Amino acid sequence: MSQQWIPNDDFLRHTLNNPTGLSPCEFRLDNGVTVQLWDSGVICFEPAKAGDKDIVLACGVHGNETAPIEICAELVQDILQQKLLPKQRTLVLIGNPAAINAGKREVEENLNRLFSGHHSKGAGLINDERKRAQALEHYVTRFYQQAPEGSRKRYLYDLHTAIRGSRFEKFAVYPFLHGKPWQKNQLEFLQACGVSTVLLMQTAASTFSYYASNTHGADAFTVELGKVRPFGQNDMSRFAEVRASLRALVADAPLATQDFDEANFHLYEVYRSIHKQTQDFKLHFADDVQNFTTYPVGTLLATDGDTEYRVEKEGEALIFPNAKVAIGQRAMLMVIPRSVKGQLA
Ligand SMILES: [Zn+2]
């Protein structure tokens, strides 16, 4: 029998109809799965007999990044309609419903720069994105803390699409682990999701994935799945691998992983971060340049008043260029290839 709390089992529509919050409720499906709606865009599934993983899937942290929202909405609907049986505890988060309704990346502030307490720094909880970041931290904490006793594994995959095209269509950002080894099985899982380009960060960040990794010890990633498009204009066949892998993870079904071989990956680390210092900051390449584009050593990349930025290293690639950021903010990240040989667990 269908449940009555989420009309038509349409979690996304219910979220967008109630973007500022809704009354929590709990019900049980015929297959024994307990469903808890905690807030707008926050739904938790507890199998009657849960496996050893606590999985958080996040989408819509940037409101115009629709493909991940569609992937998560479909997964939730299939669970509610008992087409997909979760065997692991799973929390699905639609990050920024108000921004989704506005069709914008953000309403006032980039939500993915507000985690690990950054929401309360400076001016404090002055806008809805800051309040939402604090609430999302609270829900992730509750989810992990409510897990059964015993040896458990925590995961958080924060799914995005990028503003610009990419030389490698899909890539993941592996948050800074403070010297702990990278997880081979996670690289294998990403590869099964169709993601074989990974940026290994070396500094703390204010992102959702760094928060889950650093605060909760989760294996956590920001996963960029392609280019931003409006709802209904995503070619869902391009996401077949990630959809199948996430569903298998939640259902505790076999994953289509292969043994890790570095030759099948593009692994990068940050070489330098270029911050905008003056109003004259200017990028010296086309607006539509792809992420991970490389230029010969010496090529002029950007000027900022009297400062020139040129390619310094062989293989140095640019990502996330944006001349429109506020002064003091990061305008571009420069990355270089690196190896993880002997540094995996
Ligand atoms: Zn994003």
Image (cartoon, rainbow, N blue to C red):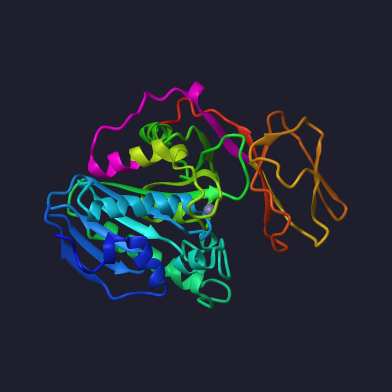
Q: Provide residue 118's location: percent of width, then percent of height.
A: 51, 66
Relative to 164, is 97 above or below? below
Q: Provide residue 240's location: percent of width, then percent of height.
A: 40, 37
174 part of magenta stretch:
no
Q: Provide residue 341's location: percent of width, then percent of height.
A: 48, 25
The residue at 49%/24% (across/down) is 264
Asked whether, in this view, residue 322 is left or right of residue 95, the answer is right
Relative to 7, is 198 above or below? above
The residue at 51%/28% (across/down) is 265
The region drawn magenta spans 246-270
Asked whether, in this view, residue 12 is left or right of residue 238, the answer is left
User: Can residue 90 be seen in the rendering of this structure?
Assistant: yes
264 part of magenta stretch:
yes
The residue at 44%/38% (across/down) is 237
Q: Quadrant of residue 169?
A: top right
Asked whether, in this view, residue 66 is left or right of residue 25, the answer is right
Q: Provide residue 320's location: percent of width, then percent of height.
A: 64, 48
